[in-house]
Amino acid sequence: MAHLRRGLTGRLVAASCVLAVLLGSVFAVLLLAVSDQRDAAALSRRSQQVLTTANRMQALVLDVETGERGYLLTGDPRFLQPWSAARAQIPPVGVRLTDLIINPARERMAHQIIHSTRSYVRDYSVPLVALATRDPKAARSLSHTLEGKRRVDVIRAQIDRLSASARAATVARQERAAAAARRAEVASVVGMAGSVLLVALLAAYLTRSIVRPVRRAATMAGELAAGDLSARLPETGAGEIRTLEHSFNTMGESLERNRDELAKLVEEQTALRRLSTLVARAVPPATTFATVTEEIGELFEADGTAMVRYEADGTATAVALWGQRDSSLPEVGSRAELGERTVPAQVRRTGRHARLDSYAGSRDKDRGPRELGVRSAVAAPIEVQGRLWGALTAFSTKERPLPRDAEARFADFTEVVALAIANAQARSELAASRARVVAATDRARRRIERDLHDGAQQRLVSLLLDLRGIEADIPDDQVRADVAEVATGLTDAVEELREMARGIHPAILSEAGLGPALKALARRSAVPVELGLGVKTRLPQPIEVAAYYVVAEALTNAAKHAQASHVEVTTSERDGRVCVDVEDDGVGGASFGDGSGLVGLTDRVEALGGVLKVTSPTGRGTRIHAELPVGSGQATS
């Protein structure tokens, strides 16, 4: 047997080593060929980039030459615009050209090109344009023309030399890569033939010595997979095969023992996944509580489950119940005494899991479980942010008690409950905080608008009236004209201040409502606006303010960023919600990035219990849709 094991293992190792060496050699040659191909491809890409950048440099030089010649011939300053743009782009293109070149010789060529180009622009083009500005006739002289042509021809020749050198390097590298590829093809053919022969010999040996015994083991594995965990394999093989047969038999026994435990674990994880999905969807806590009690009852085959919340006066409130129902069982929402020996009372005293397998000898305060026929009960604490919130309990009326580890396995479910409670509290606190911030912001806006209107604006109007009076009394026409100019500037300042005050918190919004305010906003918009006002009545002030700023921000974005030519604004009211839609035909691409006004709008809308959606595909315009519940606005105000 030892000889067989040694021969089987030794032959497999020897064959594997030979095959590994053969395949390793083939792959080494292939890797070298791939490396050469990759290097050739990289060099080709770099050379292409060098050629592209050199051509770009040549095009910029031609733009400079064209611009200056156009200016010399016509004197039209518009020819200097492409001339200036080309001058500005030459330095970064030169830097990119030198960054792309790694060959010292071609790097010197690139520096020559950059030097010649800079010299052409600095020593010829710029002075020539300046001369043309002062003396156009002198700038059109033959000597200047020939000098410009000579310089441009030098630059073109330098670029041609650099391009030829880059192309030659690419061709040479591709030829080396092709030779390596041919070597790799020969090595692949030889390696494939040798590998096929060696694998065929090894396969014949494995079939005779290993495959046939393993096939019998596979038959047993199929029986195990089909659910027949009583199947066993005769341990008649030799060496490693016999060990395999023994291992299969051991595996069958282990599977048979653990089948029930695995099924229970799967059911438990499935239940937890369903509960986690409910929490992630932010369903009401009551729904999560009811689902948890139901999942616990079915999972542990309990007769009833309950979730209670501890109150400050020592009682407990039932927040969810499942299972056995009769007149003795409390209703959801009712309060009851905890008793002394009940598992919820033990959890409240200790803050830990509790279990009771018999209520025999319980006092009158514990008559509730006895009346229900409870024989065993377990409970686990529910802690929210480090504070004992309540308990999750399950009970059985059967002779067989609940599983011994039931209370410990409750831990995952109580964590889900605690997470649902914490999330609900956090959402409530976040909504309240947003509402306070929005209200404070609106108060600050109204105060600033009022201060500007009653303070600085009135003061400027008074000064303007005084200045107009002084203007009328001045006999000197020149002085009166100067004073009139100052008065006109002061009038413009008053108008700008009035527009600024309207933008902070327009008075028409408070006095006339959302419809007139949107009409005024549309009249001042730089982009044509088509209004469709479906809301005719006054809304709560926070709702009107939020809707106004949604439209204002959307119109600002359409004018400044979207390049829109038309905007449609629509308001409507249905099912107790006000809907505001703003759609433009601009470039799209709006997002909630840093500094975007959409972030503040989202906070304002969601603080009122509403929803803000932005649809802005690139090139197809932007649509902002806001829904605001009228009831929340009333409550907030």
Image: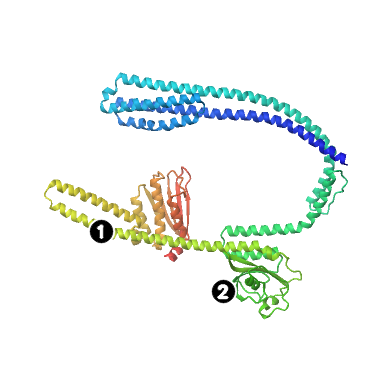
Q: Is residue 529 left or right of residue 311?
A: left
Q: Is residue 626 left or right of residue 498?
A: right
Amino acid tagged 1? Gln
Q: Can you give x and y, in whole percent of width and height, for residue 574 in the image?
A: 46, 60
Asked if marks 2 and 1 touch (Cβ < 8 Å), the reply is: no
Query: In percent of the image, x 29 and y 20: which residue is there?
Result: 141
Q: Eyeballing the image, is 561 above or below 356?
A: above
**Is residue 228 in view?**
no
Report which residue position mark 1 lands on.
458
Specify the farthest residue to the left.
475
Which one is earlier in the sequence, the residue at label 2 or at label 1? 2
Q: Quadrant of residue 24?
A: top right
**Residue sitting at 29 percent across and 23 percent down?**
139
Q: Where does label 2 land, which residue?
A: 312
Say which quarter of the image contains residue 8. Answer: top right
- Residue closest to the far bottom: 364
Split into 4 quadrants, where in the image is the C terminus?
Answer: bottom left
Residue in front for this viewpoint, 39 or 590 = 39
* Crowd tier of the residue under label 1, counting other residues whose Cα lies within 10 Å: few below 14, some 14–19, many 20 or above: some
State the scheme by which the image is colored. rainbow
Q: In the rendered image, is residue 212 in sight?
A: yes
Q: Could you tell me which residue is drawn at 66 percent across and 59 percent down?
A: 271
Instruction: Measuring from the top left, give residue 314's x and y in whole percent.
Output: 59, 75
Disc 2 residue type (three-letter): Ala
Q: Quadrant of the N terminus?
A: top right
Compared to 539, does 595 lie above or below? above
Measuring 82% from the left and 37% from the top, which residue is drawn there? Answer: 10
Q: At numbered mark 1, what does the secondary structure look like: helix, strand or loop?
A: helix
Check disc 2 and report its element: helix, strand or loop: loop
In the image, residue 419 lies at what x, y percent? 58, 61
